[in-house]
Amino acid sequence: MTRRETFADPDISEKDFVLATDLDGTFLGGSEQERSGLYDWIEANRARVGLIFVTGRDPGFIHDLTKNRGVPRPDYVIGDVGTTIAEMSHNYIVSPIEALEHEIAEAWGNTGPRVQAMLTGAPGLTLQSTQFRYRLSYDMDPALFDPTIVETVEGLGLDTIVSDNKFFDVLPAGVSKGPSLLRLLAHLNVERHRVLVAGDTMNDLSMLQLGLPAVAVGGSEASLTEAVASLDHVFSAEAVGAAGIVDAIRHHKLFPAA
């Protein structure tokens, strides 16, 4: 089903509730009926509900997902595991916010080709075909992966994330989903207590640790579930994907009409 908005949204800082959500396994997880229920609710409450995608996916994927595949258009996008911070127009165009990306670009510099050359032929790593501006991403075979690679890369002043035991990301130091989300919320003057953060893998950990109301949806990566088990602000949902998000909205009492 194709969804289209028919009115101009108020500023996101004026909305009652903001969902900042990962995509794969989270916002895109669950049954078709569960996803449709959440998506329809968001579209019916656009004047009160803000939407931010916080994902490892790139802007091209998000453009196609929202324009052609019936997924609600977000107000803002944190993509590429936190290295893209952008707004999204009603025409489904993702436009990076230069003021928020400046430090990310400086932290990355021209290190990409050097790290890529260093990791060429590294056991268990296959460079992904998508070209990213400020990160390198690899498919990882855990049976072949050499953990000392992490120390080697981080010795260059970069960060690494292993997620779902099959993806390996190289990022600028101090840059990930959590810090980028905080930077965006501050830029938009969005009050943190009105934001629900949702995720399911280890590359979501930095945003689930922020202290904002949060949910690790059902079916989350075991290491993520373990990492957030002691955090009172994180709701561990039994329901998978979209249904877990709905349960978390109710649990945290973020939108009573939900």
Image (cartoon, rainbow, N blue to C red):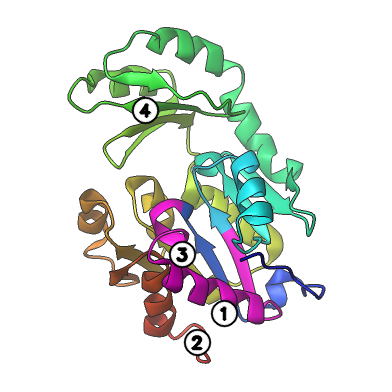
User: At numbered mark 4, what does the secondary structure look like: helix, strand or loop?
Assistant: strand
Q: Is residue 118 magenta?
A: no
Gap between marks 1 and 4 measured at Cα: 35 Å
Q: Is 94 left or right of 122, judged from the image as shown? A: right
- How far is the residue under mark 3 from the one under mark 4? 26 Å
Q: Which residue is mark 4?
A: 139
Q: Residue at x 64, y 30 (%)?
A: 105
Q: Residues within 10 Å of mark 1 (few under 14, many from 20)?
A: some
**Above or below, 153 relative to 235:** above
**What's the amino acid at mark 4?**
Asp
Q: Is residue 214 above or below residue 161?
A: below
Which segment did they paint magenta? 24-52
Q: Is residue 100 above or below residue 74?
A: above
| Label 2 or label 3, whichever comes before in sequence order | 3
For mark 1, what is the residue?
41
Q: Residue furthest bottom?
A: 257
Residue to which mark 3 is pinned = 197
Of marks 3 and 4, the one in the foreground: 4
In the image as oriented, which residue stretches furthest toward the front?
A: 1
- Circle nearer the N terminus (3, 4): 4
Q: Secondary structure at mark 3?
A: strand
In the image, residue 117 above or below residue 205: above
Q: CA distance from mark 3 to mark 1?
A: 17 Å
Q: Identity of the amino acid at label 2?
A: Ala
Nearer the observer, 73 or 13: 73
Q: Quadrant of the N terminus?
A: bottom right
Residue 258's disc number: 2
Earlier-in-chain disc, 1 versus 2: 1
- Residue 131 shows up from this direction: yes
- Amino acid type of the residue tagged 3 in the rendering: Val
Q: Position of residue 46 (x, y in %)?
A: 68, 76
The residue located at (73%, 68%) in the rendering is: 4
